[in-house]
Image: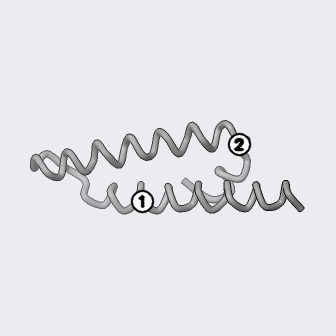
Amino acid sequence: MKAEEVRGLTADQLKDKLADLKKEQFNLRFQKATGQLEKSSRVNEVRKDIARVKTIARQAAEAKKA
């Protein structure tokens, strides 16, 4: 997921996307613990996507206040 894609989302869509990513992160951690994880690189991708969504949501909230 690219930052440009995330910036095009509304606040509600950002919240939904964040919730989906957190669920995926939980499932990946569960797969890792049980030894069923196939793509270990996906863990880092999801973590960075979560950070990207949170950053852009925070920037949008600050821009709204100003």
Residue furthest left in the image: 35
Left or right of 20, for residue 10: right
- Amino acid, disc 1: Arg
Residue 29 place in picture, x, y as percent: 25, 51
Residue 11 is labelled as 2
Tally of numbered tags: 2
Q: Is residue 49 above or below residue 10?
A: below
Regarding mark 2 in the picture, which secondary structure is present there? helix
**What distance separates the C-alpha of mark 1 from that of mark 2?**
20 Å
- Amino acid, disc 2: Ala
User: Residue at point 68% right, 59% down?
Assistant: 58
User: Residue at point 19% right, 45% down?
Assistant: 31
The mark closer to the camera, 1 or 2, is 2
- Quarter of the picture containing the C terminus is bottom right
Crowd band around label 1 with a 10 angstrom C-alpha radius: few (<14), some (14–19), many (20+):
some
Left or right of 30, for residue 2: right
Asked where in the image residue 36 lies, by quadrant, the reply is top left
Residue 30 place in picture, x, y as percent: 21, 45
Residue 47 is labelled as 1
User: Residue at point 83% right, 60% down?
Assistant: 63
Q: Nearer the viewer, residue 28 or 1?
A: 28
Q: Is residue 38 above or below residue 56?
A: above
Residue 16 place in picture, x, y as percent: 57, 37
Residue 20 is labelled as none
Crowd band around label 2 with a 10 angstrom C-alpha radius: few (<14), some (14–19), many (20+):
some
